[in-house]
Every structure is written in structure tokens, then in C-alpha cells.
Image (spheres, rainbow, N blue to C red):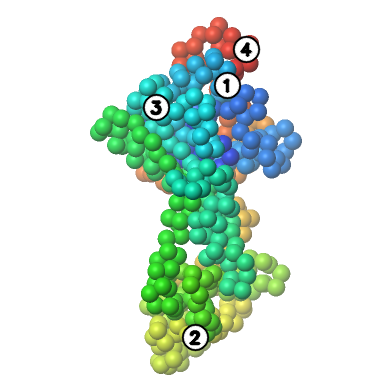
Amino acid sequence: MTKALEGVRILDFTHVQSGPTCTQLLAWFGADVIKVEKTGEGDATRGQLRDIQDADSLYFTMLNHNKRSITLDTKKPSGKQVLETLIKQCDVMVENFAPGALDRMGFTWERIQELNPKMIVASVKGFGPGPYEDCKVYENVAQCTGGAASTTGFDDGPPMVTGAQIGDSGTGLHLALGIVTALYQREKTGRGQKVLAAMQDAVLNLCRVKLRDQQRLERTGVMEEYPQFTEGKSFGAAVPRAGNASGGGQPGWTLKCKGWQTDPNAYIYFIAQAPVWGSICKVIGREEWITDPDYATPRARLPRLMEIFATVEEWTKTKTKFEVMDILNEYDIPCGPILSMKEIAEEPSLRETGTIVEVDHPVRGKYLTVGNPIKLSDSATEVTRSPLLGEHTDEVLAQLGYSAEAIAALREERVI
């Protein structure tokens, strides 16, 4: 079976998380991703958060599957020549250097176009053009500047970042879409182009419902689905933090389940969806709410949501989160257990679908990783291990046309 991106060659100048997320996804779809790393050092994450001495960390391995690694000193003239050859023979360059780094290396957009007019140059940056474009950004900075932190957490607490890597991995996913789009357009124009994904922009895109709410708040001065409305609090000028409220038209909250006193994840997320309100009332033994004018309609329930959730919680606390889910699903009541990472790692169905994959590594042994979250029916993903540092240097250079003698000379010069 052919792969969706088979025949596409990616020059991967990325490191840490945002860029590698992008290039790993492209590799899973069949692209030949050549990861260029600094001679003798490699990607910084190879040694970060290391759990096995002298082995590549999980931080690195879980972001660099299905790639080939070469080492190259691009500061040396012969190293620059190798890079020029790579540019000529690749389709896409992906980089997440600090702003201006590629230009300082001598590889401006104009120079790259001279070498390969069809080259697509894709970049992750912290900010787009503007007053902050030269600032360095990491995951949590992106969450804070993109609108996530100010709207995450509880109203009486500080802004919070989320455990999901929406700044790094989220931006990498956005960039991958931009690259595939540019490749498609190149089929029509024959030209390469620049693709930019700014981390602030990507986070904001994922927080678009909060920008929606900001405009609603400015127009009406109130948002009835927010817990502040239920609690009789006044709204300020900006969208407030809403705890575990659903953020949409379907009111929801996190409820305790049996064992919550000792298990920090003995909770379930419950949604009081209007079409199944009657079933909810029957399940929790409050059938009188079906016809009670204070509870019978969604609008009537809005100022009483926290009371309703507290009542449902008295029922959920008598059952495990999985028992609650089984019962509610019989009535099509939306809900979901709070799953710990341990529970997710041990879930058989996720192994069967390839969402959780066991990979064997020659140094660290077997480990679990997240597989391709996007499943194509005609381009199945086989997750292969991450490369050792410089593992494919000779192989790639030979494919570029370098003889064994030339490769040996580059190694003698410590270019590779």
C-alpha cells in the first residue's frame, strides 16, 4: 500500500516539540523526513527529562518517530554545501529556530529560492508580524498570550495553563496542514512558498469560542451559561474563567463519583443536554422536575444549574465513574469519565486502533507512545522508532550523490 505523502522529502530543521510534532505527522503519512541535527549534540530533547541513563528521552522519542537523522555542522563551508544540496533535493524545509536564525546562517528566503524555486519553507514562530515577533516563546507563554490561560481555571483563582500542549503540538498540527496545502497549490503553480504558523495564532484559533463570548459579553453584559450567572455574580469587561463549564450551549460540569475521597480522578463529566432532560430526571429520581416550571425548560434551568449539578452529584457519588457512564449511555445522556494517564495507557481499545502504540528501541527498550490520531483508510500508519543521533548520515549523503570517500572526508573534517 502506498502512503499519502510518499515521494515528498522533508528537510527537518526543527527541535523540541512544535516543529517535531509537525514533521512526525508528515512522516506518519509517508513523507521522507530527514532530521538535521548538530554534530555531537543533536536535538536538546534527547537528553531532557531522561529516565534511562545514556538513552534518548521519551520527550525525544515520542516526537520523532518514522524519521531519519543526519548530523551536520552548517557553520563550516563544506557543511553549508551539504545543506545547499539538501535544499535542492527536498520539497519542504521546516524550521522553528529563533526569529532571524535562518537568515543569519546565510539561507534567506531569496537564497533558498535561488537553490530551489519549488521549495516550501515552513516556520513555527512565537508571534506573527508585530511588536512581539522577535520574542522567544514556549508552550505556556503561547497559552498565556493566545487567550487560553485567562479563560482557564476558576473565577476565584489565578489564570491556569492546560495540560494539553496546545501551544507547541497545537501549532505543529496547524503547520502540517499549511504544508500539505502549499504542496497541493504547488501542483498548480509550480512554485514554492513560505508557510508560517505563529504559536499565539494557533492557540487563539483553538480558543475561538472565547472570542465569540467576548463579543457576546460586550453586547449583552451577561452570559447565562457561565457559572457566574448562576451564582449571581456580575460580569466584568473580559470573558471570565468558567471552571468546568462546557463553553457551549450544552451546560456541563465535573461531578464526583464513588471513591473520590482517595482517587483524584474519580469524577465524570456530565452534560445536562436538553433533549434528554426527562431521562436525566428519571435516572436520578427527580421525575417531578420534568414538569416543574422551575426546571422544565433550558432557560428556567440556567439560574439553577449548580443546584442541578449538586443533585446529580449525590447520585453519581454512589457509583463508580464507569458505572455512571454505563447507565447514562443507555439513555444517550452525554458524559465521560475523567481518565488518568495510567488508565489511558492500559485501555485495550486504544491499542487496537493504534492510538496507543508500543515501540521497541535498541537502547531504551519497549515504550508506549501516541500513534497517529488521524486514520486514513488508504494510507495506514506504521509507527517506527525514532532515529539514533546521526544514524542515517551516510545513507542520506549517499542518496544525495556523495561518494564514500567524500563522506569520509566530511567526517574527518567533523562536518558530520
Q: Earlier in the sequence, mark 1 or mark 2?
A: 1
Q: Amino acid at mark 2?
A: Arg
Location of residue 113 by image quarter: top left
Mark 2: which secondary structure? helix
User: Badge 3 is on which residue?
Assistant: 110
> How far apart in space, not on screen, are marks 4 and 2 (Cα)?
74 Å
The image's mark for residue 75 is 1
Residue 206 coordinates in the image, percent (x, y): 45, 57
Q: Earlier in the sequence, mark 3 or mark 2?
A: 3
Q: Around disc 4, counting alpha carbons within 10 Å, would you say few (fewer than 14), some (14 to 19), or many (20 or more)?
A: few
For image coordinates 49% across by 24% down, the residue present is 106
Residue at the extreme front of the image, as rendered: 131
> How far apart in space, not on screen, are marks 4 and 1 (Cα)?
12 Å
Q: Around disc 3, counting alpha carbons within 10 Å, would you say few (fewer than 14), some (14 to 19), or many (20 or more)?
A: few
Of tags 4 and 2, the one toward the viewer is 4
Q: Amino acid at mark 3?
A: Glu
Residue 52 coordinates in the image, percent (x, y): 72, 38
Residue at the extreme left of the image, as rendered: 188
User: Badge 2 is on which residue?
Assistant: 304
Q: Earlier in the sequence, mark 1 or mark 3?
A: 1
> How far apart in space, not on screen, are marks 3 and 4 (Cα)?
29 Å
